[in-house]
Image (spheres, helix red, strand yellow):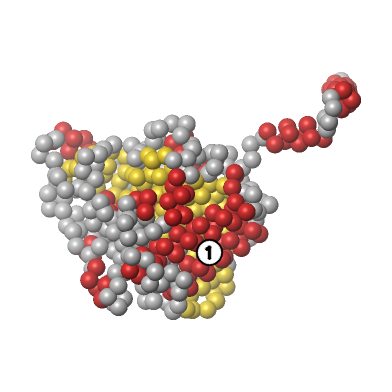
């Protein structure tokens, strides 16, 4: 009986389409079928561009008057610019938080992200995405370790360096194969960009995630001959202007391939700029400034003040993200995985605490309010500050620091109204003791140790990650 009903339904459907073709001029019955297929939601592509040690104030659209960034400024006009976007305060933990949607204290704490963590690449790979990682990894103690490298963490393809360039050299890997070592820091931005464009072109007929993590502007910095000595921001400015040009090349590639209307491009930095040894970095680079600025924010990399954690952020997706917007709502790298998962029609893992939240509504302006009201600032696994709404509390008498910040130790409770005092210059703790108490109570609930994962990575998941 069921088969008969299905046969009759198919007969009527074909008859209707035949009548449409007969009586409607130019009607194409095959086209009707394709049209219905196109009405189904198509999964978007994602490109994450992650810079290193770039300050809040180092883009034209974030206030720089010495560094010219026309492509990123245009990207901001064509999308949304977030002015209260939070990463972490140093490189490795920042990458781990971005990849896992979990505070670093939960996932290994620093430059090691535990192998049983589930990354955004694994989440999207499970949803059918091709995944590529280009550039600086810094989640495997800066060396090759089975289970911790990109090809074990959900990426089909990897090209880049597993660590930083502190010593002025890097060693490349392509997937699991170690390649050459170079001291040519000036070549890195262009090299990574070429690799990224190659990946986009190869995957243009698939749905893909590309994670491009630049080594620049981590010292030792340098720029190629096309940009070196050209900016008004000394060597550091040259580096950022080359990153701007690089981003423009990626934007142009996406447009030329016809992917512009279905690709989300996200740009942000891993942490603030070096702030405590400016003279040292100036002197070791021929007198040229090798660090950026977090102005108007206070301090920089390694600090729990805003200059360490708050980063420039731009997101663009024509037809999906309304253009010309600026939002001061709180948003974080922690939110990237849940947001991309939602846009891709899938979900983060449910066997562990996920600190990120889905910000799709905020990004696409279906809502002007963030799903995040609270952010915790950890330094070396120790809680140093908490923000809730406009209020930020700096906790006194901490014991773990990155001493190069120059302002690491806080000896008295500090409270700042970030809406009125973005530079954290006016401590109002004595004026609002009830706010201090509320934030102290909130701080007591912050993550402060690794949490158990209910399910370890399955053999199936590990096999997929390794494939």
Question: In the drawing, does residue 394 fall left or right of residue 10?
Answer: left
| Quadrant housing the N terminus | top right
Where's residue 451, x and y in %? 38, 48
Where's residue 116, x and y in %? 49, 55
Q: Residue furthest left?
A: 430
Q: Can residue 35 be seen by looking at this rendering?
A: yes
Q: Can residue 141 be seen by looking at this rendering?
A: no
Where's residue 308, x and y in %? 29, 55
User: Could you classify mark 1 by the number of other residues whose Cα lies within 10 Å: few (under 14), some (14-19), or many (20 or more)?
Assistant: many
Question: In the drawing, does residue 166 fall left or right of residue 186?
Answer: left
Question: In the drawing, does residue 2 fall left or right of residue 168?
Answer: right
Q: Is residue 88 above or below residue 436?
A: below
Instruction: Give the quadrant of residue 223.
Output: bottom left
Please name the residue shown 56% across and 61% down the image.
Answer: 196
Q: Secondary structure at mark 1?
A: helix
Please name the residue shown 27% across and 75% down the image.
Answer: 287
Please name the residue shown 49% across and 38% down the image.
Answer: 322
Q: Who is closer to the viewer here, 86 or 4?
A: 86
| Quadrant housing the C terminus | bottom right
Where's residue 93, x and y in %? 37, 57
Please name the residue shown 20% across and 58% down the image.
Answer: 408
Q: Is residue 412 above or below residue 244?
A: above
Can you identify the residue that label 1 sits on?
193
| Number of numbered discs | 1
């Amino acid at each position: 009986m069921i088969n008969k009903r299905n046969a009759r339904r198919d007969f009527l459907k074909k008859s209707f389409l035949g009548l449409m073709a007969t009586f409607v001029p130019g009607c194409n019955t095959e086209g009707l079928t394709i049209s219905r297929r196109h009405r189904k939601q198509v999964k978007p592509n994602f490109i994450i561009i992650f810079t290193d040690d770039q300050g809040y104030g180092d883009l034209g659209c974030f206030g720089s008057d010495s560094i010219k960034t026309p492509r990123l400024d245009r990207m901001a006009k064509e999308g949304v610019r977030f002015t209260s976007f939070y990463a972490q305060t140093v490189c490795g933990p920042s990458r781990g938080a971005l990849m896992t949607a979990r505070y670093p204290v939960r996932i290994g704490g620093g430059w090691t992200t535990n192998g049983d963590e589930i990354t955004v690449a694994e989440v999207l790979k499970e949803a059918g995405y091709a995944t590529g990682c280009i550039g600086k990894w810094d989640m495997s103690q800066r060396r090759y370790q089975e289970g911790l490298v990109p090809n074990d963490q959900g990426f089909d393809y990897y090209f880049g360096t597993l660590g930083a360039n502190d010593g002025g050299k890097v060693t490349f890997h392509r997937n699991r194969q170690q390649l050459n070592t170079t001291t040519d820091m000036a070549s890195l931005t262009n090299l990574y960009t070429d690799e990224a464009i190659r990946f986009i072109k190869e995957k243009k007929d698939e749905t893909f995630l590309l994670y491009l993590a630049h080594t620049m502007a981590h010292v030792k910095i340098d720029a190629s001959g096309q940009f070196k000595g050209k900016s008004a921001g000394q060597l550091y400015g040259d580096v950022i202007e080359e990153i701007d040009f690089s981003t423009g090349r990626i934007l142009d590639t996406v447009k030329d391939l016809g992917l512009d209307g279905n690709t989300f491009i996200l740009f942000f930095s891993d942490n603030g700029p070096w702030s405590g040894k400016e003279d040292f970095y100036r002197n070791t680079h021929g007198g040229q400034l090798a660090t950026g600025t977090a102005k108007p924010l206070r301090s920089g990399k390694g600090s729990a003040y805003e200059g360490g954690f708050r980063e420039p952020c731009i997101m663009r997706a024509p037809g999906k993200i309304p253009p010309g917007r600026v939002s001061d709502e709180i948003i974080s790298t922690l939110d990237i995985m849940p947001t991309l998962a939602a846009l891709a029609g899938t979900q983060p893992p449910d066997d562990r605490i996920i600190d990120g939240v889905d910000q799709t509504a905020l990004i696409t302006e279906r809502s002007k309010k963030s799903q995040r009201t609270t952010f915790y600032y950890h330094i070396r696994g120790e809680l140093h500050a908490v923000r809730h709404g406009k209020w930020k509390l700096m906790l006194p008498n901490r014991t773990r620091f990155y001493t190069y910040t120059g302002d690491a130790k806080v000896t008295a409770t500090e409270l700042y109204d970030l809406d009125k005092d973005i530079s954290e210059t006016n401590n109002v703790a004595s004026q609002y003791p009830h706010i201090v108490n509320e934030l102290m109570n909130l701080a007591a609930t912050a993550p402060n140790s690794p949490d158990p994962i209910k399910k370890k990575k399955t053999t199936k998941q590990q096999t997929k990650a390794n494939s």
